[in-house]
Image: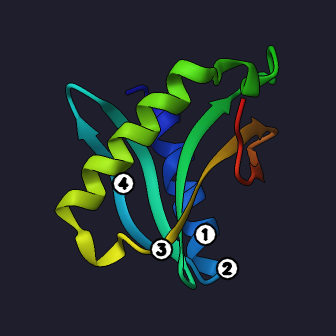
Amino acid sequence: MKIKGHKAERIVVNFLKKRGYKILACNFRSYSLGEIDILAQKDSKLHCLEVKSSFRGQKPLWLKINKKKIAHISKTLEFWLKLNNSYWNFDREIDLAIVIFKNKKAFIKIWHNISL
């Protein structure tokens, strides 16, 4: 992963913690299924966050998310839940976190429960 990707994920983790989320995993990976950038819990809901970042604000970053990517995240979450079955009955959603770096500042926007 690129340096900006790691930096963006750290920024999003701190953003979520300040808002009461519990971070359960970062960069959880199943090589045959996919990866979850950040897995967080708030109340009784699991949030799988896909993090995208840009230094220039090029093409809209949400265009990098497609049905195939969401399917991989969903399958990876199912695998994670089998390993952590105490979370099996939690509601779950896939969220998109966008981090734009501009003038030495990071701007964060989170879209909840994305689907295509």
Q: CA distance from mark 4 to mark 3?
A: 19 Å
Q: Residue at x 60, y 69 (%)?
A: 16
Q: Three-letter amino acid code at disc 4? A: Cys
Circle count: 4
For label 3, the SS is loop
Of the image marks 2 and 4, the number of the one nearer the N terminus? 2
Left or right of residue 89, residue 14 in this image: right
Q: Position of residue 114 (x, y in %)?
A: 71, 43
Q: CA distance from mark 1 to mark 4?
A: 12 Å
Q: Position of residue 36 (x, y in %)?
A: 41, 44
Left or right of residue 76, residue 8 in this image: right
Q: Residue at x 33, y 49 (%)?
A: 78
Reading the image, the residue beneath label 1 is 16
Q: CA distance from mark 2 to mark 4?
A: 17 Å
Left or right of residue 98, residue 29 in this image: left
For label 2, the SS is loop
Reading the image, the residue beneath label 3 is 90
Quadrant of the snapshot with the N terminus: top left
Reading the image, the residue beneath label 4 is 26
Q: CA distance from mark 3 to mark 1?
A: 18 Å
Q: Position of residue 2 (x, y in %)?
A: 43, 26
Reading the image, the residue beneath label 2 is 19
CA neighbours of label 4 inside 10 A, class few (<14), some (14 to 19), many (20+): some
Whether tag 3 and tag 2 are in contact, CB under 8 A, the answer is no
CA neighbours of label 1 inside 10 A, class few (<14), some (14 to 19), many (20+): some
